[in-house]
């Protein structure tokens, strides 16, 4: 395999593992770096105020010590006199729909964000399996909320890679999440890093390999490639002599009226439930299946008795449930506003077989703005792979204008 003579040396920071080690990576092209609008506001804040808030939201690729601490190290090196606050809002397995509903809790509640990085393409593809509609609604929910919270915030969306998405690109197709996210980013004039397409190009030109890159959760080498692309985008966006911050334009119309642009997570304690339900911390030591410690000690609305029910009244146009779906995950029967019409929602996920898997399922969408009541029963049917009928709700996901 041939490797390029020109190599870019990146100092790779892997938090709590090693201090710093040099990795040689292939030079990244400009083909898959898309500067839209302006990125100069963040530079001005970092240079003039001496402070900066940088946040990253996404799935496990963000939560892990990968591109995120590398970009943080680059910013601290670029602006040595600036005191940075870095927010890690990565939660493994979560998609853009969950992200749109938890953005306020995990990012915006911590104050103005000057530079926001978003990463959800892989999880929208391989975990959530979103169609175009929900990938748009999730990403638009994230971008619209961030813009409303701070119209001067700079935002970068990165499309990471899996082999399925890469093979689609090789066939001349663009994976649904990347198409959806790019459409929203065009609409809001948000800059993007198409790492997935760049990686296809590098591998097919025999400049690197999938094994070297590290897979879906990249090795330091792979995260250094992403960091090099981000640095290249920022260098281009910051290569302007400006002395005044701008208000980023906000589209007059939403791409999708059903987008989660007012997404919030609500405490499930407000639900009205029968004697078969509890709001408490489940006894995880007595429940089969893997469990992530970040959810330990949290109170959930939980039950497992078939035909038991709860009701929940909410404001807005849609309602979801942010659940932990384990090996015993059940199926919900859902009625909206007392209607006899019912639909079912299967909580079990293919990753539920060995893990209490965090996911957001939509219970009702396309509602008229206003007050609604949803009635949920545990259905007698069961996924063929599930061992039970359990329902464990971390939060309700609401979408009401405030």
Image (cartoon, rainbow, N blue to C red):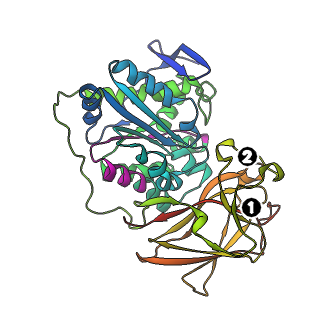
Relative to 138, 113 lies left or right: left
Residue 205 in view, yes or no: no
Quarter-wise, where is residue 77 in the image?
top left
Tell me the quarter of the image containing the C terminus.
bottom left
Asked if disc 2 and disc 1 are in contact, CB closer than 8 Å, the reply is no
Q: Residues within 10 Å of mark 2 (few under 14, many from 20)?
A: some
Q: CA distance from mark 2 to mark 1?
A: 14 Å
Whole-percent x, y for residue 293 in the image? 69, 42
Determine whether 118 is above or below 28 in the image: below
Whole-percent x, y for residue 182 in the image? 40, 49
Relative to 253, 3 lies left or right: right
- Identity of the residue drawn at 49% across and 64% down: 398
Question: Which one is in front in this view, the residue at disc 2 or the one at disc 1?
Answer: 2
Q: Residues within 10 Å of mark 1 (few under 14, many from 20)?
A: many
Residue lying farthest bottom?
340
Determine whether 231 is above or below 395 in the image: above
Residue sitting nearer the eye, 248 or 2: 248
**Element type where label 2 sits in the image:** loop
Whole-percent x, y for residue 5 in the image? 47, 12
Residue sitting nearer the eye, 171 or 248: 248
How many labels, in total? 2
* Residue on which disc 2 sits: 291
Q: Earlier in the sequence, mark 2 or mark 1?
A: 2
Highlighted magenta segment, given as a residue range: 141-163
Relative to 350, 16 lies left or right: left
Whole-percent x, y for residue 254 in the image? 33, 62
Q: Which mark is residue 96?
A: none
**Element type where label 1 sits in the image:** loop
* Residue on which disc 1 sits: 329
Residue sitting nearer the eye, 85 or 355: 85
């Amino acid at each position: 395999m041939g490797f390029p003579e020109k190599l870019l040396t990146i100092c790779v920071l892997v938090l709590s593992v090693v201090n710093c080690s040099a990795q040689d990576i292939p030079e990244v092209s400009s083909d898959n770096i898309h500067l839209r609008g302006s990125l100069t506001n963040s530079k001005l804040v970092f240079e003039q105020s001496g402070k900066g808030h940088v946040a990253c939201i996404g799935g496990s690729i963000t939560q892990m010590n990968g591109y995120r601490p590398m970009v943080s190290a680059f910013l601290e090196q670029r602006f040595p006199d600036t005191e940075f606050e870095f927010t890690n809002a990565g939660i493994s397995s979560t998609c853009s729909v969950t992200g749109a509903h938890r953005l306020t809790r995990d990012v915006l509640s911590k104050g103005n964000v000057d530079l926001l990085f978003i990463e959800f393409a892989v999880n929208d593809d391989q975990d959530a399996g979103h169609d175009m509609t929900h990938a748009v609604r999730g990403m638009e929910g994230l971008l619209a909320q961030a813009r409303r919270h701070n119209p001067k915030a700079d935002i970068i969306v990165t499309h990471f890679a899996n082999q399925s998405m890469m093979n689609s690109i090789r066939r001349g197709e663009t994976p649904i999440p990347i198409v959806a996210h790019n459409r929203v980013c065009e609409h809001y004039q948000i800059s993007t890093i198409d790492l997935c397409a760049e990686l296809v190009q590098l591998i097919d030109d025999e400049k690197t390999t999938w094994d070297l890159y590290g897979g879906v959760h990249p090795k330091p080498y792979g995260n250094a490639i992403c960091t090099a692309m981000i640095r290249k985008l920022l260098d281009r966006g910051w290569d302007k002599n400006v002395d005044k911050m701008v208000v980023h334009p906000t589209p007059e119309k939403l791409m999708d009226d059903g987008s989660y642009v007012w997404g919030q997570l609500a405490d499930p304690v407000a639900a009205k439930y029968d004697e078969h339900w509890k709001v408490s911390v489940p006894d995880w030591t007595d429940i089969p299946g893997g469990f992530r410690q970040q959810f330990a000690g949290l109170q959930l609305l939980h039950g497992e008795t078939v035909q038991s029910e709860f009701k929940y009244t909410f404001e807005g146009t849609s309602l979801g449930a942010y659940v932990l779906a384990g090996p015993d995950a059940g199926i919900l029967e859902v009625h909206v506003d007392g209607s006899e019409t019912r639909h079912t929602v299967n909580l079990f996920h293919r990753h539920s077989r060995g893990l209490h898997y965090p996911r957001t399922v939509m219970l009702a969408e396309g509602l008229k703005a206003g007050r609604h009541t949803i009635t949920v029963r545990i259905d007698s049917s069961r996924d063929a792979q599930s061992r039970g009928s359990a329902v464990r709700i971390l939060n309700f996901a609401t979408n009401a204008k405030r």
